[in-house]
Amino acid sequence: MKGLAGLAPIASLVAVLAFAPVAHADVKALEEGAKKEGELTWYVAHYTSEGAEDLGRGFTEMYGVKVNVVRTTAQVAYQRLLQDLKNNQTICDVFSSTDVGHYVRLAAEGRFEKYVPETEGKILPTFRNFDPAGFYHTTSAGLVVLTYNSTKVKAEEAPKKWQDLLDIKWKGKVSTGHPGFSGYVGTWVLTMKNLYGWGYFDKLEKNKPQIGRSINDTVTALNAGERQVAAGADGSTLFSASRGNPLAVAYPTDGSVLIIAPSAIMKGTKHPNAARLFMEYLYSIEAAKINAKHFAIPLRPEVPSPPGAKPISEIKTIRPTVADIDKGIPEVIEQWRDTFGN
Amino acid sequence: MTIAAPAVATSDVSRRSISFDSTWLIWIAIMAVLLFLVVSPFIYLVVTSFTAEKTGAFTFANYAAAYGRARYVDALMNSLKLGGAAAALAGLFAIPLAWAVARTDMPGRGLTRMLVLATFITPPYTGAVAWILLAGPNAGWLNRFFMLVTGAEAGPFNIYSFPGLALVIALYSFPYIFIFTSAALELVSSEMEDAANILGAGAWRTMRRVTLPLALPAILGGLIICFLEAIALFGSPAMIAIPARFNVVTTQLFQFFGNPVRVEVAAAYAMPLLGVTILLILIQRLMTRRKGFVALTGKGGERRAIRLGPWRWAMFGYAMLVASLAVFLPYLFLIQAAFAKAWGRGFGLENISLRNFHFVLFEHATAAKSVLNSFLYAGVSATAVVILTLGVAYIVTRRLVPFGGILGFLCIAPFVIPGVVLAIGFYAAYAPPPLALYGTALILVLAFTTRFLPIGYVNASAAIRALNPEMEEAVRVLGGSRLTALRRVVAPLLKRSLLGAWLLIFIPATRELSAAIFLYGPNTKVASVMIFDMSEEGNFEYLAALALILQVLTLPLLWIGQKALGRDFMLRRNAT
Amino acid sequence: MSKLVLKNVARRYGTVEAVADFSLELVPGEFVSLLGPSGCGKTTTLRMIAGFVPPSAGTIEMDGRQISSPSSVVPPEKRRMSMIFQSYAIWPNMTVGENVGFGLQVRKLSRAEIDRKVDAILDVVQMRNLKGRYPAELSGGQQQRVALARAIVVEPEVLLLDEPLSNLDANLREEMRFEIRRLHDEFKITTVYVTHDQSEAMVTSDRIVVMNHGRIEQIDAPHKLYARPKSRFVAGFIGRTNFLEGTRQGSDVRFDGFSAAASRLEGSDGTALLYSLRPQAIGLSTQKPNGSSLAVEAEIAGRSYLGEYWDYQARPLGGTRSVRVSTGPGAVFEVGSRVWLEIDPAAMVRVE
């Protein structure tokens, strides 16, 4: 009995060490430096405006560092960044785009700072080690799925697979974003092209879809009743539904398009400590909770999926390769413009 | 008997030679400023269009790229067609109303003027948003009403179309034609009309053969301005043409600034806009040259209103129709959207919420700041323009320097440069090193200043010409310098006119989008760009809230303007 | 039968009476001027005749037909009158020929007829060779002629002119007022002419209506107006004059510096009397005149030489104030010298 009693203090020590938040020495130093720097500029396409603002606010509440949230669609963010670079200005500290191709190119030009967040080991294994070289890391994941207005469309009638959107009964009732703006839409278009050839879009054109810019345009189009079905993002759609809007999600049987979107620190950032701290923050439980609130996939296993969203393990997903995205998205943008006139 | 020479001779000569030098200095200083603001961006624009991106060598490749693709040429054609359609439609709205208000006994003339003013201060992109709410093909309120009333499956209105875009542009640029036409109709000397009357011409014949022809140059001027506005607009085409699936020059230019940034091709692509503008202005000059329409003196007796009889109510109905399209319906539904949780859900009490305002003002990191930015930059630009143009106008009108006409010309030249083109020129000239003004507030302020130089100059020179130079000469005879005369006589006399000019620049500057969209940086976003960005996610509730805030903040300025300058200060062409 | 009759015409703006109790009859072919200082109501009256302004009271009749009353006004386009405006109001968007032909077009004459008449009238005003010009290309005097041609070619019942010469320089003005009278004589149009310049009125008119503060002071032919003004205003407005205040004392009227027998003066009953005496009506000499006129000794107090005449101020020895005397250029008197004034009492006009 004496031996077991002797184990107790050790056990409790282990317990404390295992479950207490690790006050890492590095993070503390980052915090000090970040507070001195005072602010951070974040080009982000990952979330809705609200989601991005929420995350920024969370960071400010935790560390007292201001976040300049510049939320735009992915291509616009990239355009901004390229202009900054062309003029030798480093305005952006952390770059979060939904078009993986951006990262391939920017990393190749040496535009990023290598930084592997300490907390990377704590996120779900699927999302770890996106870039072996350590320049950019997954910070958000979402799906492009079939969405519809539940008061106008009954669940049985809703489209079940991607091909269903081409059905003539949806003529004038479809909504999408624009690949020339949104990384989500660009990736989705590329995936459809890979699955069904460009003929898919020639046929979709005949259904006269309403083309917005961001993929979140579909949410507002469905809410307004302007359109009835869409190729939308699960996160923003479910979040809007949770607010009482008549929206529903159908996970396509031929595969939801999984978007894995990374973030990276810009080389020569004026706020290196804040930027690093922010990357840590994006992997934190607090950030995961905010993500869950907005129906984005939380990256930490400790945080459960929000109610109403299917856990990712239960969904059939498809995803183009990084190389594919890099080369493919610029191509499909041009093809889209030719087919849809704009 | 000899006459003694005046004692002051020598010192007088030396003082004159000093002032001779300082005159040249002033000329050079102003010339330098105008070169920087007007000439340099223009030259950069032209040069850049011929420069190869990577090598910097001279090339025609940019023009080939800009016009090589059918889609790009289509965009140019679309712009021209859009300009024509919008101008024609705007004329249809404006000319009958202007005539009714200026020359007839239609009831509600004062009300109509006010409503035109309300239209004038509505930015075209706000109008576009409102019309999306009104005439979205499925959810638009007009369509819903139609479906309700007729039981039809779908409504006939689709804002996402070429006619839709032309309508929206026409609705928010018709005030230009209204202002020009009604001013001209009021300025046509009533003796001209009396002369026709007494010779036997009734009201209609007089209108046809005397009044309208005399007002024609002004009407033409208004139509041209509408056309130029339409082809240079960015916001409403971006919001409507993209879903409508056609391209115009401005949205295409935006793409050239996209991924990758091709300033050179953008410059080449923008040149035809410039060419069209210059051509139109030349045409207008030529058409009115020989006849010398300056006999607009607006003097003489009581002006007799044309009696319309029962037709006055038809005319009033037309005025209210136009006002409904431009003001009543759009603002009604903008307000509904601003206070709604989801605008599509209608007018029910459960749909009302202040959340949108709260989000825009307090939660969104940059929305509130963007409004401040708009007002700050507009204020600085307006001040710069007023001071600069006052100086130039004074120097030119009083003929203080030789070749003063060049200065005046440079002040007016930006008029022919569409806002987008100007912005691209500024981008090409000043964004990169050595000045590296990219993303700064300064480049925005400079672009705005240049853009509004013509308004400032026209106002200032009209005001100074109305001043009798003898008043300043009286000061100088009594020993004061020219500067003293300026300070103590000219400036106080021009106070009201300067204030009017300042407001006339400030108010449009707060809502300027076409130039800002190419020059803003993350820290220098202005409200117009913010509103445009918000339309990206289709977030019309937030958008409506922000747009309304911007409108409401403009009202006190209008009030000040009216108090200082009389009832319709913005509807006058010259704020003297 | 009168051509144009105004009966007690009045025009009020709020409480201001621009024209009050205006009555006038014109015979056909007559040339009448409305003369007075600015603000006297002459232009308002003209515009009432034209039909641009309705009268507040009174009526206007033409050829026996009522055309203006407070309740109904025949519109200007139906009156068959013509008007020439101060600014000429030549339409800049039409050529000279088109301007002049406008009224004929309204009357639906044939093209050929219009051309003929236009050419004829342009000949009369000597503007034929400028028929194709635009007004911006003409001088002020030429524009004036175009206005005249345009007004006359339609053979109006009444021709109205509103200070047409005030924008011209002095020489041109003299030439043009003869021209206007000449045209009137040639075409015999009933004419109403508004002016503030009395020499214009005198040269052109058959009768002059002198107006002041909206009321008629006097209507008379020019020479009568000059010689026998009825009121102080008229006497002072038309030409220069001396105002002599006199008091009746027994059979004499005493003035400042001299007196005259009451029987020789017109209207000499009453106590405080005012007379107007023209400077030209007083003789000036170094010798005492012997005749039936009054002889008053005076001293030259001041003089001005104007080329065409001398303007003397001569103070009667027994008086305090000087009278103005005009003489020809040859009659030179030094300041301070003694002279004799020759005054004919019959030339002294009693004024109110």
Image: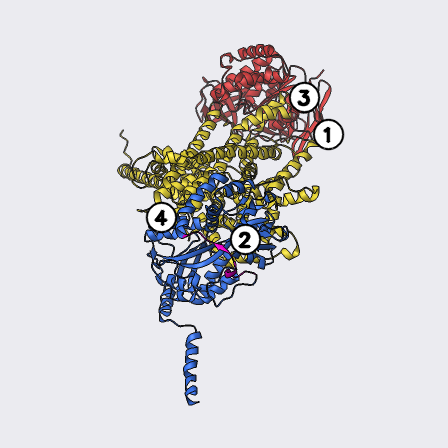
Q: Are marks 3 and 2 on the same chain?
A: no
Distance CA(mark 2)–CA(mark 4): 52 Å
Label 1–label 4 contact, CB within 8 A: no
Is A163 located above or below residue C128 in the figure?
Answer: below
Q: Which residue is mark 4?
A: B437
Of badges 3 and 2, the one in the foreground is: 2
- Say above or below: C289 vs B559: above
Question: What residue is pinned by disc 2?
Answer: A253
According to the picture, the residue beneath numbered tag 3 turns out to be C78
Which residue type carries mark 2? Thr
Q: Position of residue B128 (x, y in %)?
A: 55, 43
Q: Colour of chain C?
A: red
Spatial CA distance of label 1 from label 2 is 87 Å
> What SS does tag 2 mark?
loop
**Residue A201 visible to the viewer:** yes
Question: Which chain is yellow in the rendering?
Answer: B
SS type, badge 1: loop
Residue A309 within the segment the image draws in magenta = yes
User: B49 or A147: which is nearer to us?
Assistant: A147
Magenta stretch?
Answer: A308-321
Can you say whether B362 is above or below C307 in the image?
below
Quote the CA–CA distance across marks 4 and 3: 70 Å
Q: Which residue is mark 1?
A: C71
Mark pair 3, 2: CA separation: 86 Å
Q: Nearer the viewer, residue B137 or C303?
A: B137
Find the distance from the CA under tag 1 to the CA under tag 4. Answer: 72 Å
Cβ–Cβ under 8 Å for marks 4 and 3 = no
